[in-house]
Image (cartoon, rainbow, N blue to C red):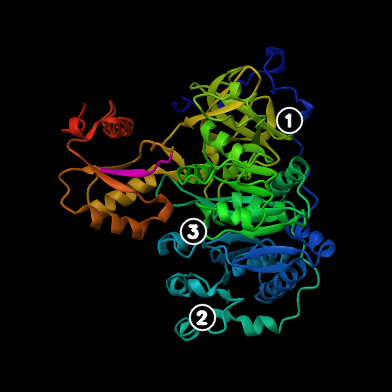
């Protein structure tokens, strides 16, 4: 979809007199209010800790922590954060991966009235430096010590490093003496913070980074009132309770992890953390832990289907199954429904900028099949208090059914990007007729059917979603070009395998002399694992579009043709250059 020839906020929006739904009038289900949510993230956990102190709050690696134990350790970390001088509303880095330290650290940060920034130790150092700017307190784990040295050495300001499970930091306190190190022994002596320092509705709850088109990660600060609006709706929609046992499958740098943690903890339920290895083959985990709630990207279910783990009746304890992060194929949903016959299945949709998920579609058995398009389950309707509109290629709003770029507004939509006013101005806009309402341009192309149900079609630009991760292909392009030493290198989302799984393919000029293994090794130094090309495809003469740019769509079509060509008929599949 082409970008509008002039900004959307300069165009006249349809009014109520035009008969356009949702503009100039508000239905009860889509009314937007400016009031913030009453409870902070910390208060949602603390209420459950007070009501259910002896119930398991966190189950990880075979070890369970009760709400009381988790509360006490988080309160000690909150004390250490306050002792460091961290002010209310400042950011605390979580330099850990889905460990006890990570989860306790997140709770400690929010109990201290701070926001948190997940920092994956496996990410390249340059990326971590960009993501951690402005962070003066870092909570880390023993497994991350090897990566900590480079990050601290590049820090512009002194940092307080808190290691709840680290007895000795080794040589770091001597070699990096300008930083302060607080280990497990010192934390054990701290009196727990008696009550949480209350964050305000406009304070940052968490800061997450998505892939950026300029080659740098793009920060999205989500406010307490944004995530509070989401959690209030989820509590009513899914009715989780203290007897539920919910999965935790998402990396902490992925915003769906916020749902895992706080939707579970506000209900007094148990959060059961899958290892990275178990996530894509979780059948035994679901059964052994008697899970009642499942939440993952659809790719997990696709992988389970490939491994023949979705046997009919395999997961009788599940009562709720949620999918989000990418398109959900109808065939995959059918297999899952057969494996979990007692589970209600919902397909959710939402960019990070709209706080976790903002639309949903509840599967009602085969009667819902008629609503599916192109074999994909709909993304449904906006949540109460949220708004959705479609913009056509000229920037006007689509009335009734039709296709366009999805625009979102409401209490869940964030205020902009972190320290990026130009990017904020291009994506967060105002519409005529709604001067007090900010809309987010998602870049997603969506169809609205006659019943008002939304169907995801694709991206307006080169951003993709893969295994639930948002990836700007231009960022992968930049790494490929550095790794090859050539501008004739681009990335493409490869064709689907038989089970629907896809991967990134790096398309590089056939004349590049560096061997494929060396190129991929260099890419691994520049990119997180989830953004890595799975393989390289050498091209004799890059196809060009009418603007003289490399034609990514032509390369994707060529890869599709190669995948469909029997090996005995394959001779030379490289596309010829076009002018």
Numbered disc in front, either 2 or 3: 3
Residue 329: x, y in percent? 52, 33
Indicate whether residue 502 is drawn in magenta.
yes
- 151 lies left or right of 381: left
Indicate whether residue 225 is drawn in magenta.
no
Residue 371 got which mark? Answer: none
Residue 1: x, y in percent? 45, 26
The answer for how far apart the CA atoms under marks 2 and 3 are is 38 Å
Rendered view: 403 above or below 276 = above
Give the residues in magenta: 501-507
Give the image quarter of residue 161: bottom right
Rendered view: 417 above or below 437 = below
Q: Which residue is mark 3?
A: 277
Instruction: Tell me which label, 3 or 1, sits earlier in the chain.
Output: 1
Q: Which residue is mark 2?
A: 178
Query: Depth check: 546 or 370 in front?
Result: 370
Q: Residue at x 54, y 55 (%)?
A: 253
Q: Which residue is mark 1?
A: 30
Numbered disc in front, either 3 or 1: 3
Counting every numbered tag in the picture gives 3
Query: Depth check: 206 or 98 in front?
Result: 98
**Circle 3 Cα neighbour tier, 10 Å, few/some/many (<14 / 14–19 / ≥20):** few
Query: Depth check: 444 or 35 in front?
Result: 444
Instruction: Tell me which label, 2 or 3, sits earlier in the chain.
Output: 2
Give the image quarter of residue 138: bottom right
**Circle 1 Cα neighbour tier, 10 Å, few/some/many (<14 / 14–19 / ≥20):** some
Do residues under tags 3 and 1 come within 8 Å of each other at their CB atoms?
A: no
The answer for how far apart the CA atoms under marks 2 and 1 are is 52 Å
């Amino acid at each position: 979809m082409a970008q509008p020839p002039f900004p959307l906020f300069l165009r006249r929006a349809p009014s109520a007199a035009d008969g356009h739904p949702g503009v100039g009038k508000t239905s009860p289900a889509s009314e937007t209010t400016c009031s913030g949510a009453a409870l902070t993230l910390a208060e949602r956990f603390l209420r459950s800790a007070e009501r259910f102190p002896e119930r398991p709050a966190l189950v990880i690696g075979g070890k369970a922590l009760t709400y009381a134990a988790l509360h006490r350790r988080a309160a000690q970390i909150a004390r250490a954060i306050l002792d460091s001088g961290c002010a209310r509303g400042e950011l605390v880095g979580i330099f850990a991966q889905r460990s006890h330290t990570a989860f306790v650290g997140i709770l400690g940060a929010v109990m201290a009235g701070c926001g948190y920034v997940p920092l994956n130790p496996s990410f390249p150092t340059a990326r971590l430096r960009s993501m951690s700017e402005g962070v003066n307190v870092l909570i880390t784990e023993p497994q991350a010590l090897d990566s900590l040295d480079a990050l601290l050495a590049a820090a512009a300001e002194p940092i307080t490093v808190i290691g709840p499970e680290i007895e000795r930091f080794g040589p770091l306190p001597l070699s990096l003496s300008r930083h302060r190190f607080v280990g497990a022994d010192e934390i054990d002596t701290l009196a727990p913070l008696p009550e949480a320092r209350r964050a305000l509705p406009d304070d940052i709850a968490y800061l997450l980074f998505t892939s950026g088109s300029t080659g740098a990660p793009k920060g999205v600060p989500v406010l307490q009132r944004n995530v509070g609006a989401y959690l209030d709706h989820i509590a009513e929609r899914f009715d989780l309770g203290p007897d539920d046992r919910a999965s935790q499958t998402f990396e902490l740098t992925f915003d769906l992890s916020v749902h895992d943690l706080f939707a579970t903890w506000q209900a007094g339920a148990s959060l059961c953390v899958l290892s990275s290895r178990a996530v894509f083959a979780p059948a035994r985990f679901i059964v052994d832990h008697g899970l009642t709630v499942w939440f993952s990207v659809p790719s997990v279910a696709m992988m389970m289907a490939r491994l023949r783990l979705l046997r009919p009746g395999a997961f009788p304890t599940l009562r709720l199954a949620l999918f989000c992060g990418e398109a959900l194929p109808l065939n995959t949903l059918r297999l899952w429904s057969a494996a979990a016959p007692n589970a209600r299945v919902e397909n959710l949709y939402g960019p990070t900028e709209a706080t976790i998920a903002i639309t949903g579609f509840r599967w009602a058995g085969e009667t819902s099949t008629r609503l599916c398009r192109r074999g994909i389950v709909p993304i449904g309707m906006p949540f109460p208090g949220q708004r959705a509109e479609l913009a056509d290629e000229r920037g006007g709003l689509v009335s009734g059914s039709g296709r366009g770029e999805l625009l979102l507004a409401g209490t869940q939509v964030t205020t902009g990007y972190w320290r990026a006013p130009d990017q904020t101005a291009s994506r967060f806009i105002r519409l005529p007729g709604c001067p007090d309402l900010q809309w987010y341009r998602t870049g997603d192309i969506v169809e609205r059917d006659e019943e008002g149900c939304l169907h995801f079609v694709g991206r307006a630009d080169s951003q993709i979603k893969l295994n639930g991760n948002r990836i700007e292909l231009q960022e992968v392009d930049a790494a490929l070009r550095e790794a090859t030493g050539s501008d004739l290198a681009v990335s493409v989302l490869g064709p689907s395998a038989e089970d629907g799984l896809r991967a990134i393919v790096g398309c590089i000029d056939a004349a590049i002399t560096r061997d494929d293994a060396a190129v991929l090794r260099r890419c691994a130094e520049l990119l997180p694992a989830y953004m890595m090309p799975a393989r390289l495809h050498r091209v004799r003469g890059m196809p060009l579009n009418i603007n003289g740019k490399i034609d990514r769509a032509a390369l994707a079509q060529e890869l599709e043709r190669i995948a469909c060509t029997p090996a005995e008929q394959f001779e030379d599949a490289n596309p010829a250059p076009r002018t």
